[in-house]
Image (cartoon, rainbow, N blue to C red):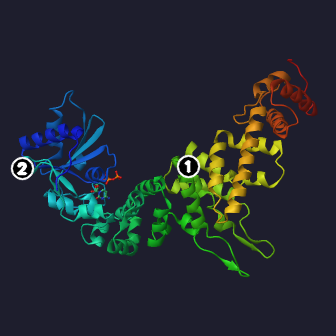
Amino acid sequence: MVFDIKPHEREIFMLIEQAGAELDFPTYVVGGYVRDRLLGRPSKDMDIVCIGNGIKLAQQIASKLRPIPRIVVYQRFGTAMLKHKDMEIEFVGARKESYRVDSRKPTVEEGTLEDDQNRRDFTINALAVSLNAQNFGEIIDPFGGLHHLEHKVLKTPLEPGKTFSDDPLRMMRAIRFSTQLGFAIDEETYKAIAKYKNRINIVSKERITTELEKILKADIPSVGFKLLHKTGLLELVFPELAELHGVDYKNGKGHKDNFYHTLEVVDNLSKKTRNIWLRWAALLHDIAKPPTKRFDPEHGWTFHGHEALGAAMVPRIFRNLRLPMDGKMKYVQKLVRLHLRPISLTKENITDSAVRRLLFEAGDDIDDLMKLCEADITSKNPQKVKRYLENYELVRTKLKEVEEKDKIRNWQPPVSGELIMKTFNIPPSREVGNIKTAIREAILDGKISNDFDAAYAYMLEVAKSYGLHEVNP
Ligand code: CTP
């Protein structure tokens, strides 16, 4: 079969052909680029394999382009990369040994195209397109990759145990591709994942997390997490999430399975947002249910405090997964901590003060919090779903009203610490903090309005109780 070369590809393909011919290096486009193009998915990363030296090939091509592009050379791996238009093109010589340059077996030997294709993870990733004059554009498909693309199947080119031993991350890649592309995993390949799952322990956390994130970014992330669970990989790579699985019974009463509930929440939310950190918050919102689970003969199963303990668990989970320990982690932590607050607002008569407090704590993340809460409704009873959604609609209306009135969302103290120190001629001290907190609490409780004059007057009043008097009015 011949690859349908698009006009924007023709120029660069011809150039590669020409440079390859000059050096006598047969050249091929391989891997993900070919797969994605055949699937009609956009792709900006192109891998070129040559029978020869990839760095020399890249230099030869660069010398023909105007302006001459900069080449990034990875001498240790024998690869070179250049940017052309909006494409990143990587060049490498065909290899015989383990494909991954950063795998535990760094020794790589030169090989034929067939050797190189043998060393790849799945048949759909082992397709090559010839860029050589005698068969320009022909698809070279030694393992039935085209058939598997058509039938949406992921299968290793060699015996799966061999392919997975070469690089155990491929077990996670199988599950990730299955989730991203909606492909089934071939039975033998699937069985091998379950069999060799423990090999994942030799793979770096960073590479594992990259795959977890790609699963979480997919349209229906639950597909991947269910496969991770079924193959036994989940408890190795993300034990806290695996812990959510299962139902306990006591006195004939069971609770819901928090693993499947969590995945439903993630799927619901994924229909509304591509924000990966909001998706992480959904994945982690009930993470502390297992350690807070109790059975109370009167009330049945309870998970008191799971939101607070869950928030406390977030930093450790992020650190273990090598996720960023910055504002993103804080954002996820905040949403986990607050995820029950909007529900509690629907249960009582909503007071302005409770709404103000939520606005103050959530700040600009209030809309994301509401999205998470709405996604958290997984009841199968349509009447209940309708009622819960209506309740949240009321909360949203109330949030809007109070925000318009009181402007609490990005609250800044109307009276600063400096002003307090200056007014009473005192140094930085506990009193300054106490006065500031008292003003904030009075505003949140609605005792005073959120403006300078009210706050200033209140400051004078509070300061009196500390025996402080205005010296610099
Ligand atoms: N590959 C492999 N084993 C791996 C990683 C990659 O065999 N563990 C091969 C596959 O042939 C793959 C190619 O290297 O197609 C390029 O890898 P990479 O860029 O990581 O993945 P893509 O397949 O391009 O897909 P994505 O960009 O979605 O990760």
Residue at horizontal 73 percent and vertical 57 percent from the top: 387
Residue at horizontal 7 percent and vertical 43 percent from the top: 21
**In which quadrant of the rendered view does residue 100 lie?**
bottom left
Residue 472 placement (x, y as % from top left)? 85, 18
In the rendered image, the quadrant that contains the N terminus is bottom left
Q: Which residue is situated farthest in the top direction here?
A: 473
Q: Is there a contact, CB below 8 Å, between mark 1 and mark 2?
A: no
Q: Name the residue tied to disc 1.
A: 272
Q: Which mark is residue 134?
A: 2
Q: Quadrant of ligand 1?
A: bottom left
Residue type (three-letter) at the residue carrying disc 1: Lys
Residue 277 placement (x, y as % from top left)? 54, 48
Marker count (numbered): 2
Q: Is residue 189 left or right of residue 289?
A: left
Q: Is residue 208 above or below residue 418?
A: below
What SS does tag 1 mark?
Answer: loop
Residue at horizontal 45 percent and vertical 56 percent from the top: 209
Q: Which residue is situated farthest in the front direction here?
A: 383
Q: Is residue 199 visible?
A: yes
Residue 14 placement (x, y as % from top left)? 14, 40
Residue type (three-letter) at the residue carrying disc 2: Gln
Q: Is residue 257 above or below residue 372?
A: below
